[in-house]
Image: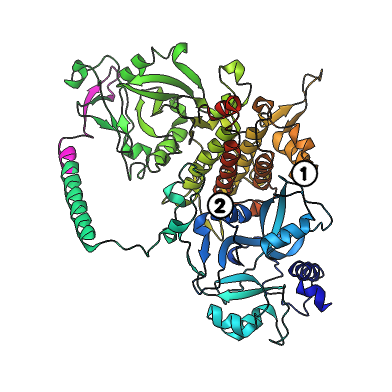
């Protein structure tokens, strides 16, 4: 028996079986048994990398970013991997999930996984053979503290380790380790078994990124995902350079302040209003834009070039009387941060050729969208009836306060007695929907795999921003492929914030009770049943978008070949979930392959497609607690993109295939 326990994977297998039997003789229920299925905590895993473990490989193994990895500074050579930890369905223990890509055809898959993760992971099936390229879903052992400590570190006992040595190494008491793990006799610990180290602070030092092997180039992550812990503070900078840099920075700040004062004094945002009485004696407001260059709403970018004609800038009345909503009408906090540009109805009308069909881009949820060359700037103009004031105000409130590369920028607005207009930056490539569903008939080339993953990552970053990084958090409530727009470089931007809603803290979740709005096929089960709009509702809709990216199919699929006037309609999510039940891993992808978009012509890495499908599956989980948050989605998509770029690089020798893949990237 002791010989078996000397092998880390056999010890871990026995430990897992003991967990399943809810044994409490050797291990306590405190970190292991979890009854609160809604709880999610931050945990760490102590991992000792081998000589062939690069930073990119470790990130892929644990599905984390560099900022989630710290290193032990005491010479033991361990890394600490930060992961979110929670209760898993069917297992009364705290666990985390990851995926592992098999790199060999030799041996048992179980042995390969146990050796790779040094006993931190568990794979139930012990008899499957390894298959190169397969992607396997794994369970990682982690723990959540009861509150006495901030973090628990999962640690696999090695030869030479003891409770006393670990207490000294991690700076904690022996009593705390014994208490957490239910150790009655500190001399009776098992090599190869997993124990928990309780800590009050984050273990280790920031990973020295400057010394890491250069990673495969991928698009830079947003500053929202950048951790200050990633900076290498050990670099030395000459004193003179520091003083000089501070001096230059001070001069730039002074110049910036002077420029801002000058711009404000020149009435950059000023307007002139004239008040006239109409035939019924009611006062109407006429609005004229001054000659000064106008700003985007809070973006700091100019709309340059041609302005309104001389008659209007001279203050002469126009032929069309328009009513401009005042800030008090829109609500007291609409313009807390930024003021949008106000355009005249004449400008909107003339630059859209009188709202002609040739300028029509499409129909949105609450109005039609037109193309316009407004003051030499390409823009998209949403035309809404005056009855849609609520949606109009919602977009103004959100987009005047949030600015991100992956959110469509609001430029300004206009209004008449009967209509409201919102002016946005123009997305040259249109919506993601038009590129996924029957693209050839819409004049588009099919999207390559790399482009699809990049678009998904862009949209995820935009959604993560409004969920977690804005001063007040928002839930979009209408995430779908038609609301993900693509610019000239096929970079994605989330649009249509007419249904966006502020979410407030309620207990441990962010909840906003409201009537059900949105698009069927994308609505989360709890939102449909209870009207509870949360950030996890957006995650569900984003999971449907991921399924669309993989399959090229619509969110709602009508049954084919039926003669009925009311054909059956099924959600894409339910179909794909059924397919994934028949494809537990990438080694048995035959059923999933039938649902992969044929427009990609089999030019995609099978393991990455499976990873994306599994991520989508997690996003559309019926239980919102088990869905990842958008930060976790961004991390997973970053890893999938990294692996996809590596796969694409292997095709460089095939010029025809390679050129087709990088087109438009």
Residue 328 at x, y percent in the picture: 33, 39
Query: Observer-nearest residue: 202 or 219?
Result: 219
Residue 433 visible, this orientation = no
Q: Residue at x 63, y 54 (%)?
A: 61
Quarter holding residue 315: top left
Instruction: Point out the tag, 2 or 1, that comes first from the N-terminus.
Output: 2
Q: Residues within 10 Å of mark 1 (few under 14, many from 20)?
A: some
Q: Which residue is mark 2?
A: 56
Residue 5 at x, y percent in the picture: 78, 74
Q: Residue at x 70, y 81 (%)?
A: 182
Q: Is residue 436 left or right of residue 338?
A: right
Residue 58 visible, this orientation = yes
Describe the element under mark 1 as helix, strand or loop.
helix
Q: Is residue 344 above or below residue 472?
A: above
Query: Observer-nearest residue: 439 or 355?
Result: 439
Q: Residues within 10 Å of mark 2 (few under 14, many from 20)?
A: some
Residue 553 at x, y percent in the picture: 67, 29
Where residue 200 is drawn, which disc sits there?
Answer: none
Q: CA distance from mark 2 to mark 1?
A: 23 Å
The image's colouring method is rainbow
498 is within the stretch colored magenta: no
Q: Residue at x 54, y 37 (%)?
A: 454
Describe the element under mark 2 as helix, strand or loop.
helix
Query: Observer-nearest residue: 196 or 505?
Result: 196
Q: Is residue 324 left or right of residue 111?
A: left
Residue 304 at x, y percent in the picture: 26, 26
The residue range painted magenta reads 261-283
Where residue 587 is drawn, which disc sits there?
Answer: 1
């Amino acid at each position: 028996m002791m010989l078996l326990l000397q092998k880390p994977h056999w010890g871990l297998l026995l430990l897992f079986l003991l967990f399943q039997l809810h044994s409490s003789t050797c291990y306590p229920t405190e970190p292991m048994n979890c009854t609160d299925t809604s709880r999610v905590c931050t945990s760490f895993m102590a991992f000792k990398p081998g000589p062939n473990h690069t930073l990119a490989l470790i990130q892929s193994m644990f599905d984390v970013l560099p900022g989630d990895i710290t290193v032990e500074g005491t010479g033991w050579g361990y890394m600490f991997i930060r992961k979110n930890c929670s209760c898993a369905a069917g297992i009364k223990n705290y666990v985390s999930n990851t995926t592992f890509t098999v790199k060999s055809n030799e041996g048992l898959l179980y042995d390969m996984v146990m050796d790779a993760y040094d006993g931190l992971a568990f794979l139930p099936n012990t008899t499957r053979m390894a298959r190169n390229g397969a992607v396997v879903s794994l369970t990682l052992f982690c723990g959540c503290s009861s509150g006495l400590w901030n973090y628990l570190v999962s640690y696999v006992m090695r030869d030479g380790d003891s409770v006393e040595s670990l207490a000294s190494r991690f700076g904690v008491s022996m009593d705390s380790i014994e208490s957490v793990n239910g150790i009655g006799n500190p001399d009776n610990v098992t090599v190869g078994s997993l124990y928990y180290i309780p800590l009050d602070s984050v273990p280790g030092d920031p990973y020295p990124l400057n010394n890491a092997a250069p990673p495969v180039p991928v698009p830079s992550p947003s500053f929202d995902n950048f951790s200050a812990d990633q900076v290498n503070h050990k670099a030395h900078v000459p004193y003179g350079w520091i003083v000089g840099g501070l001096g230059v920075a001070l001069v730039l700040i002074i110049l910036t302040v002077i420029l801002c004062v000058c711009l404000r004094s020149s009435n950059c945002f000023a307007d002139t209003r004239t008040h006239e009485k109409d035939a019924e004696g009611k006062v109407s407001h006429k609005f004229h834009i001054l000659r000064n260059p106008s700003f985007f709403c809070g973006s700091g970018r100019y709309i340059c070039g041609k302005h309104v004609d001389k008659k209007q800038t001279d203050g002469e009345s126009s032929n069309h009387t328009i009513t401009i909503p005042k800030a008090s009408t829109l609500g007291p906090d609409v313009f807390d941060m930024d003021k949008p540009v106000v355009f005249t109805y004449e400008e909107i009308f003339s630059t859209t050729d009188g709202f002609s069909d040739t300028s029509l881009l499409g129909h949105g949820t609450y109005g039609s969208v037109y193309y316009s060359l407004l003051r030499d700037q390409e823009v998209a103009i949403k035309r809404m009836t005056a009855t849609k004031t609520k949606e109009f105000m919602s977009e103004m409130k959100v987009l005047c306060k949030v600015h991100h590369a992956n959110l469509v920028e609001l430029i300004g607005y206009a209004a008449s007695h009967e209509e409201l207009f919102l002016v946005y930056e123009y997305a040259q490539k249109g919506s993601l929907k038009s590129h996924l569903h029957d693209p050839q008939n819409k004049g588009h080339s099919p999207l390559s795999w790399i482009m699809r993953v990049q678009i998904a990552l862009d949209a995820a970053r935009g959604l993560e921003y409004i969920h977690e990084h804005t001063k007040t958090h928002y839930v979009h409530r209408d995430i779908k492929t038609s609301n993900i727009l693509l610019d000239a470089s096929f970079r994605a931007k989330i649009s249509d914030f007419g249904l966006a809603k502020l979410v407030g803290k309620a207990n441990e979740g962010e909840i906003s009770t409201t009537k059900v709005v949105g698009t069927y096929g994308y609505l989360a089960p709890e939102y449909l049943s209870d009207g509870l709009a949360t950030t996890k509702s957006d995650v569900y809709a984003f999971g449907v978008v991921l399924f669309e990216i993989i399959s090229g199919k619509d969110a709602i699929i009508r049954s084919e070949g039926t003669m009925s006037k009311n054909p059956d309609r099924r959600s894409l999510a339910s179909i794909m979930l059924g397919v994934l039940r028949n494809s537990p891993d990438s080694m048995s992808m035959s059923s999933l392959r039938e649902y992969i978009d044929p427009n990609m012509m089999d030019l995609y890495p099978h393991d990455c497609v499976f990873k994306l499908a599994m991520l989508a599956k997690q996003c559309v989980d019926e239980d919102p607690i088990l869905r990842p948050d958008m930060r976790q989605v961004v991390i997973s998509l970053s890893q999938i993109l990294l692996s996809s770029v590596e796969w694409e690089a292997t095709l460089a020798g095939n010029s025809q295939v390679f050129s087709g893949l990088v087109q438009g990237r």
